[in-house]
Amino acid sequence: MGTSAETVMKDKPGRRSGPRRKYTVSEKCAMVEETQVHGVSVPEVAQRHGVNANLLSVWRRLYWRGLPTGEARSGATTLLPVDVSTPTMLPTERAVAPKADRPLSIEV
């Protein structure tokens, strides 16, 4: 689960420059559950696992809502048959704009 065993490439300022690390759903859930322990902060857990604290916060929100965490679920979508037909009412003519050549009469 840790990224310390991997070879991490960094540029001069120390930013990660290699390919992005992909976490499984179980790894994400384990990190989120670590943050739910009393007295443990999100930045602590994020630093321990080499993850940005903002990303871990996003995973926490998704976890609380019960939403999937970005993993593709196979067979989750069912398509329904659809019949496409012509509309029942067709426009027959355009709306006529008022003529601008007539002066408007304003009475005071």
Image (cartoon, helix red, strand yellow):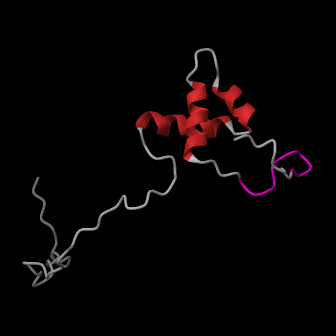
Q: Nearer the viewer, residue 82 or 77?
A: 77
Position of residue 97 measured from the top left corner of the image (x, y, whole percent)? 17, 76
Q: How many marks do you count on the picture? A: 0
Is residue 93 placed above or below 38 in the rendered structure? below
User: Is 17 contained in the magenta span?
Assistant: yes
Which residues make up the magenta segment?
10-20
Position of residue 80 measured from the top left corner of the image (x, y, whole percent)? 23, 68
User: Is 14 contained in the magenta span?
Assistant: yes
Task: Look at 44% across and 56% down and name the residue there.
Answer: 73
Task: Look at 41% across and 39% down and name the residue there.
Answer: 66
Q: Nearer the viewer, residue 31 or 101?
A: 31
Is residue 13 placed above or below 54 in the rendered structure? below
In this view, the residue farthest toward the right is 12
Task: Look at 64% across and 27% down and name the residue there.
Answer: 42
Task: Look at 42% across and 37% down and name the residue there.
Answer: 65
Position of residue 37 measured from the top left corner of the image (x, y, whole percent)? 58, 20
Is residue 81 placed above or below 18 in the rendered structure? below
Position of residue 5 measured from the top left corner of the image (x, y, whole percent)? 81, 45
Is residue 31 placed above or below 72 in the rendered structure? above
The N terminus sits in image quarter: top right
Apparent side of residue 5 relative to residue 38 in the rendered image (left or right): right
Per the picture, the main secondary structure of the magenta-coloured stretch is loop
